[in-house]
Amino acid sequence: MLPRESWGGASGPTGAETDPALVGRPLVRYPEKADLILLTSRPPQLETPRRYFQRAITPNSAFFVRYHLFPIPTRVDLGTWRLNVAGEVERPMQLSLEDLKSKFETTKVFAVNQCSGNSRARFVPRVFGGQWGDGAMGNAEWSDARLRDVLRAAGLKPGALQVTFNGLDTPAAPGVPDFIKALDIGRIMDDPDVIVAWEMNGQPLPMLNGYPARLVVPGWYSTYWVKHLSEITVLDHIFDGFWMAKAYRIPDTPSGGIEPGATPTRTVPITRMKVRSIIAWPENGSRVPARRPVTLKGVAFDGGYGISEVYVSSDRGSTWNSAQLGEDLGRYSFREWSSTCTPARPGTYHLMVRAVSRVGESQPLEPLWNPAGYMRNVVEAVHLEVV
Ligand SMILES: Nc1nc2c(c(=O)[nH]1)N[C@H]1C(S)=C(S)[C@@H](COP(=O)(O)O)O[C@H]1N2
Ligand SMILES: [Mo]
């Protein structure tokens, strides 16, 4: 059985005591949610406390929340909700949730949903945008119909090039562009794991995570994971809406990074996630006794190849030891890791973690920088006060 631990009502520390990214940010509780760290309330943007990342599965109640527009859907009537499939298709469809569940083969996938701007607060020089700590991510098992099966049922016309996705949230203010994202046809038809999900960890999606159905694009940053999905439109051209043509773009360089403070000459849409690992325990700044074993725990993930190794250093990166890896839940999932070290003497210890993917990609020791504050994946450290 997979760990599906509920953390109950215990609110615990947020890390605000020791983490500059979290200072002054209260814990708040929204419907269907545990205590999460507030970023903004209009729209609700809520961050998962770090201790949840000791486990590969993020409970639905603790899963982060991010929206662009306000107001947001707070209830959806399944009697009238339909997923409309239209555009360059032979047979436009209006699917009820029941249709989605019954007319298509269902499939399951563990996949990390990570905001492009996760950890943006740590960029130096600072950048505009939501100043997230490291909790704008989570991992769940998503159950769903394959998007390509839905499109095949509608019948793609020969000119089909891209598909756009729109959800129930619409801008209240004039001039604010609706949140619409696009994927190339190839990305959808070649990958059976691109799915329309209605279940998360065996439960209906929480309202704040996209009830009744959302797009899941494993391996790619969650800007594509459109919530409260209501319109799928097949296009015979490249979509040029604001959220593709202007926002969620990265410098067109091999790493996606540029000189800190510079302006990129050419940009491309953000896509695949970079390999990353998190130390979820112990907390930064913890005091521990000398000569007693301390077990470090956390998760590692990448953009869809899977994690092959996680290394831990307790000497600022001079030597690295292999961590123990937890169960393999598939190449898009968080992989738990743990490592025990025994600090010999009192003093300050810097513990670092670095993951390597199955294609040999790893994390940089110096952070990448880009003007939107995306794709942070620098090797992270926590310090321990050994007494
Ligand atoms: N309908 C809708 N879907 C959306 C968004 C949104 O603003 N509206 N934001 C996207 C972004 S940028 C992120 S990071 C994820 C967050 O998913 P979550 O709120 O379930 O954690 O939703 C994506 N899907
Ligand atoms: Mo995001």
Image (cartoon, helix red, strand yellow):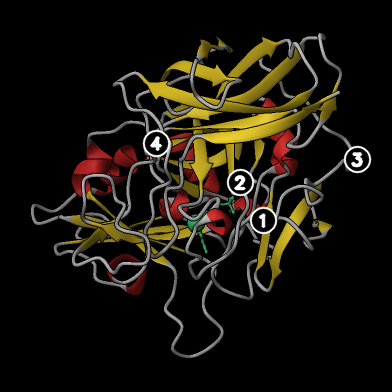
Q: Answer yes or no: do the residues labelled 1 and 2 have beta carbons within 8 Å? A: yes
CA separation in Å, label 2 and label 4: 17 Å
- Mark 3–mark 4 CB contact (< 8 Å): no
Q: Earlier in the sequence, mark 1 or mark 2?
A: 1
Residue 339 vs 220, above or below: the answer is above
In the image, which is nearer the foreground, mark 2 or mark 3?
Answer: 2
Mark 2 vs mark 4: in front: 4
Amino acid residing under circle 1: Ala
User: Residue under circle 4?
Assistant: 364
Report the residue marked by disc 3: 9
- On residue 21, the disc is 1
Question: Which of marks 3 and 1 precedes in the sequence?
Answer: 3
Q: Identify the mark at residue 72; answer none if there is no mark.
A: none
Q: Which sits earlier in the primary sequence, circle 2 or circle 3? A: 3
Q: Earlier in the sequence, mark 2 or mark 4?
A: 2
Label 3 vs label 4: CA separation?
Answer: 37 Å
Q: Residue at x 23, y 38 (%)?
A: 189
Residue 104, position as x, y percentages in the image: 41, 34
Mark pair 2, 3: CA separation: 21 Å
Q: Nearer the viewer, mark 1 or mark 3?
A: 1
SS label for mark 4? loop
Q: CA distance from mark 4 to mark 1?
A: 21 Å
Q: Which residue is mark 2?
A: 134
Q: Residue 384 location in percent, x, y? A: 75, 29
What is the tally of numbered marks visible in this picture? 4
Image position of 347 (left or right of 275): right
The answer to whether residue 201 is visible is no
User: Camera-side residue: 190 or 302?
Assistant: 302
User: Callout 2: few (<14), some (14-19), or many (20+) C-alpha neighbours within 10 Å?
Assistant: many
Question: Which of 62/75 is in front?
Answer: 62
